[in-house]
Image (cartoon, rainbow, N blue to C red):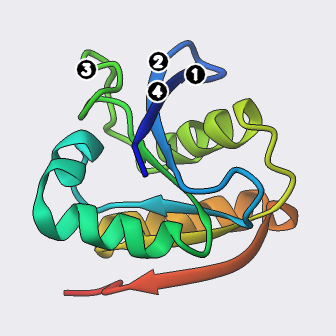
Amino acid sequence: MEQQIGYCTTSDGVRIAYATYGNDEAPPLLHLPEVPGQEAIWESPWGRAFFQEIARYRRLITLDPRGGGGSQRDAARSRPELLVIDVAAVVDHLRLDRFELFAGGPVCCMQAVMYVGARPERVSKLVLFTPTV
């Protein structure tokens, strides 16, 4: 299995990097990692093993939020609600009607809850991993 990198543009004009793994026909799972840099995660032994295991059963999608990783670096990300716009751009670009959402870490968990609050009809399941420190 290989990582497939793609890009899309948000409603406010920011370029977002995302990656897909696994079978495109499997149920989609969007993963919001605490640390941006999906390519670096993929290159690490633990990251690759983690992504490969999830992608055995799901179409795994990860994204680098604005200002980090492969996404537009000069885009300010001072407001947590901006990730809602980033997620919306990726799921709209990939034409995902419904998907499962998995977030890791306090900041991403808060942003995942914000996304579900804004678009509850899109998320079939929400998994929060370490929502507090």
Residue under circle 3? 73
Asked whether the beta carbons under mark 1 and mark 4 sit within 8 Å of each other, the answer is yes
User: Three-letter amino acid code at disc 4?
Assistant: Ile
Q: CA distance from mark 3 to mark 1?
A: 14 Å
Which SS class for mark 4?
A: strand
Asked whether the beta carbons under mark 2 and mark 1 sit within 8 Å of each other, the answer is yes
The residue sitting at 55% across, 12% down in the picture is 13
Give the vertical position of 126 relative to 2 (above or below).
below
Image coordinates of residue 60 in percent, x first then y, are 54, 59
User: Three-letter amino acid code at disc 1?
Assistant: Cys
Q: CA distance from mark 3 to mark 2?
A: 9 Å
Residue under circle 2? 15
User: Three-letter amino acid code at disc 2?
Assistant: Arg
Residue under circle 1? 8
The answer to which quarter of the image holds residue 119 is bottom right
* Residue density around tag 4, few if under 14, some if 14–19, many if 20 or more, within 10 Å: many
Disc with the residue nearer the chain's start (2 vs 1)? 1
The answer to which quarter of the image holds residue 52 is bottom left
